[in-house]
Amino acid sequence: MEKIITYDDLPISKGESIYFRMETDPKLYISLLSKGYRIVGNIKEADEKTIYVTGRRQDYTCRTFDEYKRQVDTSIQSSLKENNIVKPNTSKFSFRDLVEHRYKIPFVLKNENQNGGREKFLIQTEEDYENLISACEFLIDKNLLLLTPFARDDKRYSIDYDQYLDLNFSIQEYIKTPSEYNTTVRLLTSSSNDLLYAALKYKKPDKLHDDTTLLGYLLSEVYPLSTPSIVSNTLSGGENILIGENKYPHIEKILLNKHNIDSEQFQRLIEVTKNVHERYQKELGIISGFDYIFDEERQTWFLLEYHSFPMVGDYSKRQGIQYETREQRLTAEGRVRATALNLKLQKGYSK
């Protein structure tokens, strides 16, 4: 685990330019300026030697950010696929498909707009399926009431039911992890081709309760699902196992063994992830979090998602850095980006 540095530990600039957008700690911005770095806030001012402390997600070249994000997602997933690392089968959620074509159960209903393990529902029985339909119908009826009677009643108007759900959900195949716990692995990488932190997150399934949005409330309280929660995130009460320590409690040792953490397969996963981050450092920025899930049946790793603005709470707390208030979280993230920048500067700019 890489030691997180302070801003004072950053070296004086030797003429480097830094691409930096103000989505992270302003103190890092001030520190970079005080040490003589040239701050680039517009992608047009960047050159081949610019180091991307934050990704260029606001300076995309497509017509819309969604189009840019799709291109980046496709490129990163294609690079991982070249190394036989893929996402679980995933498709855009459609109410019409839900009702007319019927998704094959079990599957995970996942809100792409939510982080921290929120809004992920396992649909595993026919009763769950019917409750999901009922919850969606409620939302559709609620939104249709906002239309004028003329628009509702005139059959010449084709109603887009998915639009009135106002959701950004996907359908993803369910991956059974190799224990009684919900588990995922987070790799926190730097575009310097370094692994900053690796951890296995685990949580025992408990009662599903997710009322962060209206659909979440409906599914947890009004149209309940038979499944317990499927998230492992520490924000949802999960535990965190730092990978690479010498000794572990009995349960953690069992979990790590079940996930083949000491295998060449897992080491290869780390190497592939670092290489992909280095390749797409302009899009991802100086740090990125990659989340993977291990399939018990196929004994292989699948990509769940990646984050160009990953939460670094477990990494920071491990080194005694406070991570409670918003200001503390910004500072912690800024220091992790400073740590990754320091590694980049030590190695020299290569890409």
Image: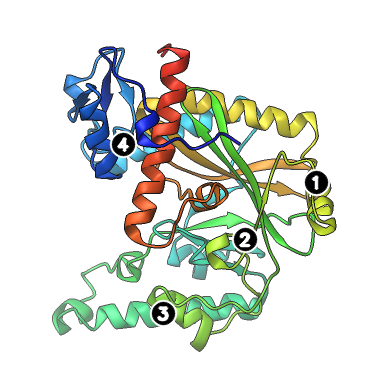
Quadrant housing the C terminus: top left
Separation of marks 2 and 4 at Cα, in angstroms? 29 Å
Sequence-wise first label, 1 or 2: 2
Sequence-wise first label, 1 or 3: 3
Q: Which residue is mark 1?
A: 247
Q: Amino acid at mark 2?
A: Ser
Asked if the residues shown at circle 1 and circle 4 are in contact, with their CB atoms under 8 angstroms apart, the answer is: no
Q: Which residue is mark 4?
A: 68
Q: Which percent across, then down, holds residue 72?
A: 39, 33
Check the image and name the residue furthest to the front.
8
Query: Which residue is at the front of the view, 111 or 149?
Result: 111
Q: Which residue is mark 3?
A: 137
Nearest to viewer (mark 1 / mark 4): 1
The answer to which quarter of the image holds residue 85 is: top right
Q: Which residue is mark 2?
A: 232
Q: Which percent across, then down, holds residue 33?
A: 21, 29
